[in-house]
Image: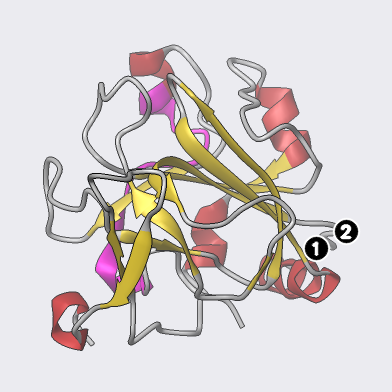
């Protein structure tokens, strides 16, 4: 029922965890999600790698700013929230997933999306100040897409859940991951094309 945003847990690694003490020490802020990269990569090797929606839902918001870059927030169906609740062993009344630092979004607000559907490509954020990666969050409360809790750990504990145990249980391996193709003459008109399976370990 759930897809991993990079296609499969075995193709991904977590570079900064949920409420990661190292992130707080280095950045000076709590971390309300996880930072993901493809396993075995470094630097900008996965710039533009397709980012997939984890489950069915509706695009709540598509936003952009100079730090986040492009951000997509998806409101998931109640069945998805119940499924995630079963994984975590507690009730999850509602669920949103957020995908940040995207190179380009390929969805729009109000659009119905499927699990495993490409919603954008991995980017570097608006200021281009870090290596390409995906910042991924799971929220149980509707907050603006660009909301950042800073050092308010209690806000994170009340409104977010750790994505790591949920991503570890993603049971749908996407064997036909999509490459993001950007038309450099019209960068506001991104396209997608199917990737060869061997590109992503299928």
The region drawn magenta spans: 8-23
Indicate the position of residue 94 as horizontal and vertical percent values: 83, 57
Q: Residue at x 72, y 32 (%)?
A: 144
Front residue of 184 and 139: 184
Instruction: Check disc 1 and report its element: helix, strand or loop.
Output: loop
Quick check: 24 above or below 8? above
Query: Dot 2 corresponds to which residue?
Result: 93
Q: Is residue 58 magenta-colored?
A: no
Q: Is residue 156 above or below residue 178?
A: above
Which quadrant does the N terminus fall into? Answer: bottom right
The image quadrant where one finds the C terminus is bottom left
**18 w.r.t. 56: above or below:** above
- Closest to the observer: 70 or 75? 70
Q: Residues within 10 Å of mark 1 (few under 14, many from 20)?
A: few
- The residue located at (21%, 86%) in the rendering is 197
Q: Position of residue 92 (x, y in %)?
A: 82, 60
At a point 33% along the width and 16% down the height, the residue shown is 26
Residue under pointer 1: 90
Instruction: Give residue 155's quadrant in the image.
Output: top right
Q: Residue at x 39, y 82 (%)?
A: 174
């Amino acid at each position: 029922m759930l897809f991993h945003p990079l296609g499969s847990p075995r193709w991904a690694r977590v570079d900064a965890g949920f409420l990661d003490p190292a992130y707080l020490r280095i950045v000076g802020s709590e971390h309300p999600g996880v930072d993901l990269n493809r396993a075995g990569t470094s630097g900008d090797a996965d710039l533009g790698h397709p980012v997939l929606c984890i489950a069915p839902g509706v695009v709540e918001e598509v936003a952009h700013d100079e730090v986040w870059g492009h951000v997509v927030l998806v409101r998931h169906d109640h069945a998805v929230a119940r499924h995630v609740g079963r994984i975590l062993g507690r009730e999850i009344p509602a669920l949103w997933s957020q995908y940040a630092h995207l190179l380009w979004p390929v969805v729009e607000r109000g659009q119905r999306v499927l699990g495993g559907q490409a919603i954008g490509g991995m980017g570097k954020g608006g200021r281009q100040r870090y290596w390409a990666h995906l910042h991924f969050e799971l929220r149980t409360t509707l907050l603006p897409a660009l909301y950042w809790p800073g050092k308010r750990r209690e806000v994170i504990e009340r409104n977010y859940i750790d994505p790591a145990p949920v991503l570890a249980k993603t049971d749908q391996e996407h064997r036909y991951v999509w490459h993001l193709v950007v038309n450099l003459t019209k960068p506001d008109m991104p396209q997608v094309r199917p990737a060869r399976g061997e590109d992503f370990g299928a």
